[in-house]
């Protein structure tokens, strides 16, 4: 969490940016939304669900909260999510509208209209049905950011099956853990994808994950993308292209219970294995469509929308796949990294496709700031009219840079706070209504009720800090943790009874605006991605060299936080290699265990870790050391000398 000086300066932020008259004149969200939601919250949500979506059977019940915290929304209706994202646009005359403008990292392009995307999804659904996928089955998707990833998700959804997308940067071990937990019967992957000018293979990780035959996986469907060689298991592996070529593009979408899980998405928690967050069909799609339309001021006939998130994360689910497609948007998807083959790639894409709405993470913005404003300024970004950020707090300096350099001082910025668990944006300015404020996520959306509470559950009031909670259920709320209802109740609902505990610290300023201050638990936020300190520590101690390890999230100028590890080697390994070599070995070990995103920025090989008398590692001290701060009170330490030892080790360059 931010320290007190930072909080003070944030809370006295004086800058306000009202929307232009032009923006207000054409805005999508109107102030009446707040009134309507306040007057009749459930009626408001019912109205959103009815107007934004097609229900095969209309619902009459809005919310059943009798079994709280297990919610049922729109429970007696029937819906097909894939039909809502595809068929109805075609049937209502929008078939020729472009749905996806795909740009591959090597520069290849592909565009798919709603009619074409619908036909592709129908073929893919027929293929999956032939492979035995039916309602309720789990399908793992481990793909690069290419149209087939989206087609695969919508095809799984079309059958009433449940997808679990695993980000392509996760290791074989992480993939295996997710396949096991969800008991998936099918995996959809690709030979490889492009990243930083190279093909990165995906299939070997799938092969490794299921090699021992100990999973429920019967088939692996492989999309050709990288053109790299793959090893093949006859009878198990099938090429997507070969199968699809024989499939009909006719497929009638069946209507399902809106509470059927649409997907499971794993996210890091405080302890133990990642949690499989379950999202529903009808409520989730209502939340995704409603927020996408209003927060992004979407005009589907004219906008070109681009969210840079990978479909492996919740932002990719809600704001690349489900929200935009339910709303009939035209959107860009880009396979690669922002700086391949040159640092202006993203701005070239905005110029090329005339992107009007752009949604990305503060880490990316800070990275571009470092690279210099000349790069975006050499491109024509005048098509942009709205900017968004997500995933981590944005510092006012980065916010101002985004506004001036990317937005030309004319685009409202929406700083959107939400989580894997909330399914959709919860706290954000509404463009054309809210006067925006650099660094603050500002206000709950109409229909969303939040509060900031002290540890003992009391509202903190203006200019005070506490814990962020959601006080009323909302349609896109998580429905549980896969296979672990107790953990669901314990993690989110035990602390404040019927209020959802988000795990974030927050401050309310004098205007009542919300400032997010970071996690209050042992979850780090690195480049807008959640990582568990415990999970990385477990990976480190699983290495035979490690005796003990402590991991913290230290402030980082670009990535928000960075993974920093302190490791004690077992005595017999201390002489085996230099500290640099040991650190390098452990960094790649963590990559292999969890994935490259979890690789520590720094590993410090130390002789001792600071502990309290009861044996608890003092992470606060480690954070102070890693961030170069003066040390606070260390009187509870068993041996204050430890600190000197660690600081010395760091000064002498004990990392790599
Ligand atoms: O700490 C908050 C931070 O990201 C966490 C959720 O991470 P995840 O489930 O991976 O979802 C990220 C994308 C929605 C939150 O608990 N976070 C997310 N958005 C913001 C944020 N922190 C500050 N400001 C935001 N706009």
Image (cartoon, rainbow, N blue to C red):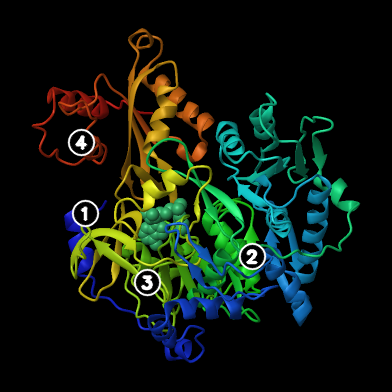
Q: Is mark 1 within 8 Å of ligand 1?
A: no
Position in image of residue 506 (x %, y %): 27, 60
Q: Is mark 2 within 8 Å of ligand 1?
A: no
Crowdedness near tag 2: few (<14), some (14–19) or many (≥20) residues, C-alpha within 10 Å: many
Q: In 3D space, how far apart are the residues under numbered discs 1 and 2 (Cα atoms)? A: 43 Å
| In the displayed structure image, the side of residue 25 where residue 239 appears, left or right | right
Which of marks 2 and 1 precedes in the sequence? 2
Quickly name the residue at label 4. Answer: 621
Position in image of residue 555 (x %, y %): 31, 46
In front: mark 1 or mark 3?
1
Crowdedness near tag 1: few (<14), some (14–19) or many (≥20) residues, C-alpha within 10 Å: few
Is residue 346 at least partly visible in the picture? no
Which of marks 4 and 3 precedes in the sequence? 3
Frontmost residue, 453 versus 147: 453
**Hey, which quadrant is residue 418 in on the image?**
bottom left
Q: In 3D space, how far apart are the residues under numbered discs 1 and 3 (Cα atoms)? A: 21 Å
SS of the residue under disc 3: loop
Quickly name the residue at label 2. Answer: 332
Indicate whether 233 appears above or below 512: above
Contact check, label 1 and label 2, Cβ < 8 Å: no
Quickly name the residue at label 3. Answer: 444
In front: mark 1 or mark 2?
1
């Amino acid at each position: 969490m931010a320290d007190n000086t930072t909080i003070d300066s944030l809370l006295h932020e004086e800058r306000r940016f009202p929307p232009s008259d032009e923006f207000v004149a054409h805005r999508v969200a109107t102030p009446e939304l707040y009134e309507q939601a306040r007057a009749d919250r459930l009626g408001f949500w019912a109205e959103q669900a009815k107007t934004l979506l097609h229900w095969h059977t209309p619902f009459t019940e809005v919310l059943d909260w009798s079994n709280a915290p297990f919610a049922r929304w729109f429970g007696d209706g029937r819906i097909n999510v894939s039909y809502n994202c595809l068929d109805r646009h075609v049937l209502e005359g929008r078939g020729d509208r472009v749905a996806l403008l795909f740009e591959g990292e090597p520069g290849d392009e592909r565009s798919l209209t709603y009619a074409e995307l619908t036909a592709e999804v129908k073929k893919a659904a027929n293929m999956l049905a032939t492979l035995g996928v039916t309602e309720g089955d789990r399908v793992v998707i481990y793909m690069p950011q290419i149209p087939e990833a989206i087609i695969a998700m919508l095809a799984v959804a079309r059958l009433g099956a449940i997808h679990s997308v695993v980000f392509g940067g996760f290791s074989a071990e992480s993939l295996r853990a997710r396949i096991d937990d969800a008991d998936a019967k099918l995996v959809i992957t690709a030979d490889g994808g492009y990243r930083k000018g190279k093909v990165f293979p995906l299939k070997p990780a799938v092969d490794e994950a299921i090699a021992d035959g100990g999973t429920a996986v019967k088939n692996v469907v492989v999309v050709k993308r990288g053109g790299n060689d793959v090893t093949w298991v006859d009878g198990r592996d099938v090429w997507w292209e070969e199968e699809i070529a024989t499939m009909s593009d006719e497929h009638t979408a069946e209507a399902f219970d809106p509470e059927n899980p649409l997907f499971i998405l794993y996210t890091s928690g405080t302890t133990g294995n990642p949690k499989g967050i379950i999202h529903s069909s009808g409520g989730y799609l209502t939340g995704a469509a409603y927020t996408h339309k209003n927060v992004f001021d979407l005009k589907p006939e004219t906008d070109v929308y681009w969210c840079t998130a990978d479909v492996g994360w919740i932002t990719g689910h809600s704001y690349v796949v489900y929200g935009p497609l339910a709303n009939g948007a035209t959107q860009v998807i880009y396979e690669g990294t922002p700086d391949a083959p040159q640092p202006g790639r993203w701005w070239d894409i905005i110029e090329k496709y005339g992107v009007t709405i752009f949604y990305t993470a503060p880490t990316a913005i800070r990275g571009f700031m470092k690279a210099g404003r000349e790069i975006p300024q050499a491109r024509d970004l005048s098509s942009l009219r709205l900017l968004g950020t997500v995933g981590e707090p944005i510092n006012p300096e980065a916010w101002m840079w985004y506004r001036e350099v990317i937005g030309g001082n004319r685009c409202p910025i929406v700083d959107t706070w939400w989580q894997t668990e909330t399914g959709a944006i919860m706290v954000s300015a509404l463009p054309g209504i809210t006067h925006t404020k650099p660094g603050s996520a500002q206000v709950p959306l109409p229909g969303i009720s939040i509060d900031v509470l002290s540890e003992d559950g009391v509202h903190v009031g203006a200019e005070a800090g506490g814990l962020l909670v959601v006080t009323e259920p909302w349609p896109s709320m998580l429905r549980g943790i896969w296979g672990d209802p107790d953990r669901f109740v314990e993690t989110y609902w035990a602390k404040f009874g019927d209020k959802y505990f988000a795990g974030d610290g927050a401050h309310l300023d004098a205007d009542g605006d919300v400032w997010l201050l970071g996690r209050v638990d042992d979850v780090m936020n690195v480049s807008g991605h959640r990582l568990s300190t415990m999970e990385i520590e477990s990976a480190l101690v699983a290495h035979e060299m490690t005796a003990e390890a402590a991991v913290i999230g230290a402030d980082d100028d670009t990535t928000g936080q960075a993974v920093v590890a302190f490791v004690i080697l077992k005595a017999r390994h201390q002489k085996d290699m230099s500290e640099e070599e040991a650190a390098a070995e452990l960094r790649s070990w963590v990559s292999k265990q969890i994935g490259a995103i979890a690789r520590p920025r720094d590993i410090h090989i130390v002789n001792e870790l600071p502990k309290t008398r009861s044996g608890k590692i003092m992470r606060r001290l480690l954070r102070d050391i890693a961030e170069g701060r003066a040390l606070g009170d260390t009187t509870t330490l068993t041996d204050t000398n430890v600190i000197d030892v660690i600081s010395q080790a760091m000064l002498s360059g004990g990392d790599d």
